[in-house]
Image (spheres, rainbow, N blue to C red):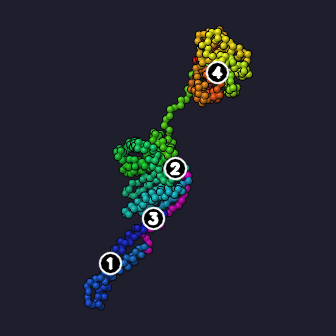
Amino acid sequence: MQRPHSPHVNRRASQRAKHSTHRTVTPSSDRSASRSHRRPPFKPLELWRRLAISAIFLLCLIATGWILLSALRPPAPIITEQADERYYFADSKYSGIRSKFVTRRSEKEQVSIEYPITGIAPIDTFVQQAIDRHDGEFRQMQSSAVNSPMTETISYQVTHQSDTHLSLVLHIKQDTHGAHPASLTQFWTFDKQAGRSITLRELLMQQEGALKAIVAAARQHVAAALEQQHKPAASLDELLTESHLEHFVVMDRSHIGWPFGQHAFLPSSYGEVPISLPIAPLAEHLQHPLAQALFEVPVPPKPEVTAPAPPAPSASCGATPCIALTFDDGPGPHTERLLNILQEREAKATFYVLGNKAAAHAATLRRIKQQGHEIGNHSWGHANLAKLSAEEVRNDLSRTNDAIRDAVGTAPTSARPPYGSTNDTVRTELSRLGMSSVLWSVDTRDWADRDSGIVCSRALASAKSGAIVLLHDIHSTSVDAVPCILDGLKKQGYRFITASELLGAMTPGQNYYSGS
Ligand code: NI
């Protein structure tokens, strides 16, 4: 370590030189006087001029001699100290950081300094200069005569280290026999890549408001600490300001810290006054990406995605929630795929089919029945039954029942009037056929949106035990939504049953909307 001692030495030398001037005046004036005897006539002005020149010449000679002598002369006490200085390098307890330990031992001082060597030159230089400033101040105080040696210990602490950032605290402990505060700190958070320290302002988006909030929180922290330690209250509004908080450390990822030693903003008698604030209450002020890189900053609360409450038990399902998925308007080109999906997930469903499609999709209808699903009557050609005469309604429903029986061997016992459109005539005709009308409680509007994500969300959002869910297997997007619906509801504990199973014994001619 280089130390700037030469100014002290020079100052001393020149002081001695000055002193010598007074001693040398007498002999030089004697010599000049003897010369003047040999050369009359006597000219007082000439004599004075010679005298002055000789005096200056002599003075210079003597001064040079003194300077040379004092430079060569060994033991100025400061040089002795330098001889007492020892240093060595060692690994620190922080990964990737080494320490340079410097010690000086003499009658006047006991010094131990630990410099961090991070390998990042601008940071190492910056910290070394800060340490040397404190050490320099300490050394200047040694001129006062004392009996026991003054002591100085400078060490460092890393509170946080990541690939990108480093938070470091210097602890400076100096016992100068009461001449100076005993325990100081300095601290920074460094951007490793930029090789410079980060200020609090850089962490904040809306700086002024955020700074005020953080300063207020820091004052509150200090006030509470003073009270707890039974120390006198202080007017912190004046004493602790934004400038004190400019440099900070990452304590852990959820706390920002200002590990103040003595005399940072309160008188030394208050002792050390460290400040540590939890990040969470300051989160709204720390949404800057830099703050998020340093700390775990909670995201401001979003509208909560409500976790589905366990479905309430229903009369038809009992304690285990159940639901009836129904598919209208088929069979169609996507029905076979739907049957695969249902088969894989062991789910039962109900298909309200059109009579005019039954013959062409007889094989599909048979597979529906074989897999244990239910087949219902959805009219022959999707007519609005409420607008038809009793006879027309009867013919429409019967014709469809026949087509289904032709395909699968049995006629359905339930119908779903197209558009949910029904009236007394429809109910009467259904009753005569021993059939009931099954409508729905959850409309996924799948025919309108044709978006499987929306269809699934809507089904999951509206589902409850005993619900009857309306879908259409003629739309590819509706079939695409089925895995999502089945998996989502299965997680909530649902089982998937047919409409007839859900509704149990139905009264012919009656309308049913759900099982609850
Ligand atoms: Ni329909």
Residue 462 as seen in the image, left or right of residue 341 = left
Q: Viewer-proximal residue, 213 or 423?
A: 423
Q: Which mark is residue 3?
A: 3
**Can you tell which of label 2 and label 4 is closer to the viewer?**
4
Closer to the observer: label 1 or label 3? 3
Answer whether residue 90 is magenta in the image: yes
Local SS, label 2:
strand
Residue that numbered label 2 is attached to = 165
- Marks 1 and 3, how far apart in space? 34 Å
11 to 39, vertically: above or below = above
Q: Nearer the viewer, residue 323 or 337?
A: 337
Mark 2: few, some, or many residues within 10 Å (few <14, many ≥20)? many
Q: Residues within 10 Å of mark 3 (few under 14, many from 20)?
A: few
Q: Tell me which residue sits at (51%, 53%) in the image.
A: 194
Q: Earlier in the sequence, mark 4 or mark 1?
A: 1
Q: Secondary structure at mark 4?
A: strand
Q: Which residues are magenta?
A: 72-95
Instruction: Find numbered disc 3 in the image and state the secondary structure of the residue it sits on.
Output: loop
Q: Disc 1 designates what residue?
A: 23
Q: Nearer the viewer, mark 4 or mark 3?
A: 4
Q: Type of residue at label 4?
A: Asp
Which mark lies nearer to you, 1 or 2? 2
- Ligand number 1: quarter of image: top right
In the rendered image, the quadrant that contains the C terminus is top right
Q: Which mark is residue 275?
A: none
Q: Give coordinates of residue 418: x percent, y percent.
A: 62, 17
Identify residue for label 4: 328
Q: What is the three-letter code of the residue carrying label 2?
A: His
Q: What is the CA distance from the residue labelled 2 to the residue labelled 4?
A: 62 Å
Badge 1, how many Cα within 10 Å: few under 14, some, many 20+? few
